[in-house]
Amino acid sequence: AGFMFGCAGLEFDVVQADEIIINPELLNDYKAVGLVNIFRMNETFVDILVDYRNNGGGLFIAGRTGVFDEHGAQDLTKLQRLLGISIPISEYKVNITKPQDTTWNFVSSDASGLINRIESETVDNYSFYHIPTFDYDIEGYAPIGHLSSNPEIATVGYKDNVVFWFSRLGWDVGIKALRTEEQFNAVCQFLRNLYDFYGVNHDETEQFEINNIGGWRKFLRTEKSYHGPISFDLTCLEDYNPSNEYIIYDWSNMTPIAKLKPVDDKLTTEINLKEMIPYLVGITKCTQHPSFVAAEWAVFEEEKWNEINDLLTINLETKIKSTTKVAIYLSNRYNYTISLDNGTILNFVEDNSTDTLLIEFQPNNTQAALEILFGEEIEDDTPPNLKIERPLKYLYIFDKEIMPTVFGNTVVIGGITVEVDAYNEDGIDQVEFYIDDVLKSTDAEYPYEWLWGEKAFGNHEIKAIAYDNEGNNAKDKMEVKIFNLGR
């Protein structure tokens, strides 16, 4: 959510719920509070927010805020209290198999200003499963967004100083979930309108100033393409050291930009910015040992450097089966071994100009510990793990799995997609696909697969050979009976 506010060019503070519970007067410094996907809420926290609302403070309630109690059990009464309504809330279950059920529209007009410049715009959300509903007319709420398939179900609405948005804001752990740039821009515009609604000042004409940017991370977005110098002011950093080197890293594309020392307390480099594209740029100080720089599809929790063993451990909150990227600063150390406690390392790439390493992996859990052991390079002669995952001992017709075969063999009618699972801690370089020892295809990117669509009849052998980044290889093969007239 913070990423979306930043991409909209809006300033905001992040305050922990525990801080508010300890000192409720903190809220007096703010005209409005954004409650975005606060899944678990206790009664004390809700009491404080209700008092804040009753005293004129604004509440922006987004996502699944207020639908669970502090123990994780569903409890819609908390959302009911935040909205200030008297009737119970029910939930509309979205049919995710209907595309029109996962899209919604803003209304064509409204006097609040919340939909200025985005009237009738359509928004498509990838994780839209349950929508809280209630009688909007009886409770005095004005719906300004509704499901495309059912206009009676509101997705966005407001009453007095409370605004609800029963969807995600469009980004999840740094990755864009909105389907098109138009939809992304519509959400950014709504957030700017939201600041106007609450009387919070923001700059609508410039998203950033080229020669005056400070802080560890900055969101950049420009209405016109820009190529030229850009400067980052480092004097706002508490531990700023003018003799230190710093890395400028683009989190939005997971690419390094530059490594340099400040001049006149600024880092200045060349940069390319495309029009209306959001960028998240981070500044990282170069330490005396390897350290974390950036992450995609992961939330950085902590890092530990073991000086005795030359071991860097990075603990992350991850998303299961989603390709994750982590960048680290190598600190001029190039002999290392990478390991992951729970998942598969897919690839890693060094950038010598910035002394960074980009590691790509797929976690098997919501928590992951990435370890990089530095020292003398040990020759790895362990072959990768390899298995042909498809086809299996089934009947396949035009690439669709129909049923297990009676005799436990593999029968294919039409073409078939051959899928291979290959893994090695050092990463997989490529996978080769053979038919009767004749090379047919090579795949260097996960997932490893090949569509066998050429003319073929009778018994044939499928063979796959996987090569890791150390040159080791592994083979797997199987027999199939195929009947295919070809494409």
Image (cartoon, grey):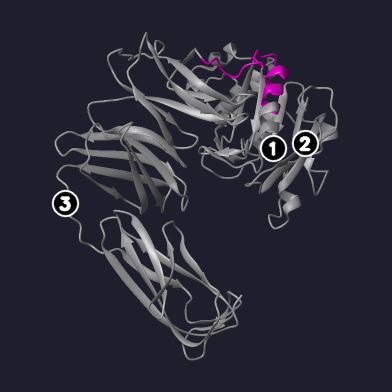
Callout 3: SS: loop
Q: Residue at x 70, y 32 (%)?
A: 186
Could you say where residue 216 lies in the image, as x and y percent from the top left? 42, 22
Q: Is residue 207 magenta?
A: yes
- In whole angstroms, how far apart are the C-alphas of marks 1 and 3? 50 Å
Query: Which numbered dot is residue 183?
Result: 1
Q: Is residue 407 magenta?
A: no
Magenta-highlighted residues:
190-210
Which of discs 1 and 3 lies nearer the camera? The answer is: 3
Q: Residue at x 47, y 27 (%)?
A: 281
Q: Taking the image as drawn, is residue 88 in sight?
A: no
The residue labelled by disc 2 is 121
- In whole angstroms, how far apart are the C-alphas of marks 1 and 2? 8 Å
Callout 1: SS: helix
| Amino acid of disc 1 | Gln
The residue labelled by disc 3 is 378
